[in-house]
Image (tube, rainbow, N blue to C red):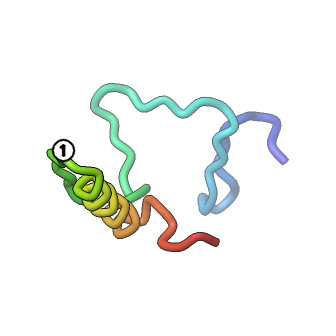
Amino acid sequence: MSSVKNYTEQGGERTVIGGTLEIVAGGQVVGLFTPAAFQADSTATTIAGLVTDFNSLLAKLKAAGLMEPTNG
């Protein structure tokens, strides 16, 4: 076990961040998740319309892997 907060294990297969990971201007993190598809602002004027818009948003979050597809 290392005594420093941030380290890469021998072989480079695993990096442990025990402190703060700061991404400065111009820096990028890639490969963490797939962005969800665009969801237009709701213009619903009824509860039923709002439910439809909300369910569309949930479907897009699930398709992008940002939400579990089922409970459990």
Residues 11 and 62: in front is: 62
Residue 22 on image: x %, y %? 48, 29
Task: Decide: few, some or many residues near mark 1? Use Cα within 10 Å; few <14, some 14-19, many ≥20.
Answer: few
Tell me the amino acid under the disc marked 1. Asp
Q: Which residue is mark 1?
A: 41
Numbered label tally: 1
Q: Place residue 17 in its image quadrant.
A: top right
6 to the left or right of 51 = right
Residues 27 and 43: in front is 43
- Image position, residue 70 (x, y; %): 53, 73
**Residue occupying image coordinates x 43% and y 59%:** 66
Q: Left of 69 or right of it: where is 3? A: right
Q: Is residue 9 above or below residue 29?
A: below
Would you identify the image quadrant in which residue 35 lies?
A: bottom left
Q: Is residue 35 visible?
A: no
Where's residue 62, x and y in %?
A: 40, 66
Residue drawn at (20%, 54%), measured in percent from left and top? 38
Task: Pick out the residue farthest to the top.
Answer: 25
Q: Is residue 16 something one can see in this rendering?
A: yes
Q: Which quarter of the image is occupied by the C terminus?
A: bottom right
Please, what secondary structure does the residue beneath circle 1 have? loop
Which residue is pictured at 42% across the width and 32% down the height?
Answer: 23
The x and y percentages for residue 45 are 18, 46
Q: Which residue is painted at 34% across and 41% down in the image? A: 28
